[in-house]
Amino acid sequence: MPVSVLVVDDSGFFRKRLTEILTASGQIRVVGVASNGREGVELAESLRPDVITMDYEMPVMDGISAVREIMKRRPVPVLMFSSLTYEGARVTLDALEAGAVDFLPKNFEEIARDGGQLQKILIDRVLDVARSRPANRVLPASVRSQPESPRPAARPATQAPGEASKPAAPVRRELPPLVSGHQGFQSAPPVRPSRKGQAHHYSVIGIGTSTGGPVALQRVLAALPAAFPSPIVLVQHMPASFTPAFAERLNKLCRIEVRQAEDGDILRPGLALLAPGGKQMMIENRGGQPRARILPGDERLNYRPCVDVTFGSLARAFPGKTLGVILTGMGADGREGCRMMKQSGSQIWSQDEKSSVIYGMPMAVAKAGLSDEVLALDDVAPRLIEGVC
């Protein structure tokens, strides 16, 4: 049965072009079009589509407001179209936080070299998004304050460990619930060894994710204390223009420090480094000083950044001394990197199906028998605190 799609965009040309491409697949049926967010909300209720494509800037009601309203009334998987700019990244991250599943650049030339490739990308993405099933959720009308806990300001490069640093302003705030994933697969049962006396010191913790990852990472990292004792490296499938804005957002929401990694950055406790979009991040260990190495993105690899690349480097740099965590995402990126980490004696955790927006990457790891623990998203941070601190 074809996937039904509602197209919401104020550009008549874009509505027509998108409808032509999706309809030509034979797998997708465009059941309606809307020229503004308010009309989109109303048609979403009456047409009950499987997927909604949503522009972010429209008259009457913008795309983010429309997504919030749709999630309140009848949650539907939403694919956002956005510009690949810094401001476009901020708006898209707001949309994902509001409940959108994934995003694509609105400028088609930015995502494909030819018409055939463009058609495949769009169709595959809509079909993938259709497999996610948002659960009913109530988004907070406003961000409610939580007990504040100041995060120490980042030390200058010349400042030695132990030197005094000026505390940063408190930035702790509550995040909205994550959209739950579809129920098409059966995940492996959680493996939960006895936790008493099980605290570990991991040289580095690696977290890899894709679709649904921005909100998932917010939920995990915002729950960690400022004095979290292990360095963290983050790999999120995301364009180069988006990762600076995403790192900035995480840094404002978290008590630990989060920033986009630069070549030569030293890993240290209480710091999470986000792999830059369009490039690869590897971790090396020379003389007991772990550093990030940022390399050009290899066109032969599907993902830039790639979880397998980063996790493979962790397995080589710190055999038996790392923890790999795979969260929600399409595909199987991270499985081979986790295999290398596991073979070196390190531990692997994966997110469960129920709390995943897309149960692809964590399913690949669990089905390969690599997961030491399969955890609901909201259990990841408590387990990190319990098992590391």
Image: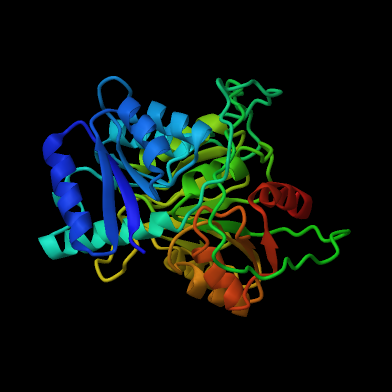
Residue 241 shows in this picture: no
Q: Position of residue 101 (x, y in %)?
A: 43, 47
State the residue at coordinates (57%, 45%). Answer: 135
The answer to which image quadrant residue 118 occupies is bottom left
Q: Position of residue 109 (x, y in %)?
A: 14, 50
State the residue at coordinates (55%, 40%). Answer: 218
Left or right: where does residue 249 sit relative to residue 271?
Answer: left
The answer to which image quadrant residue 368 occupies is bottom right
The answer to which image quadrant residue 54 occupies is top left
Left or right: where does residue 68 sit relative to residue 380?
Answer: left
Residue 234 shows in this picture: yes
Which residue extends farthest right? 196
Q: Position of residue 303 (x, y in %)?
A: 35, 62
How is this picture coloured?
rainbow
Q: Position of residue 215 (x, y in %)?
A: 51, 42
Location of the N terminus (image quadrant): bottom left
**Nearest the eye: 46 or 187:** 46
**Nearest the eye: 63 or 230:** 63
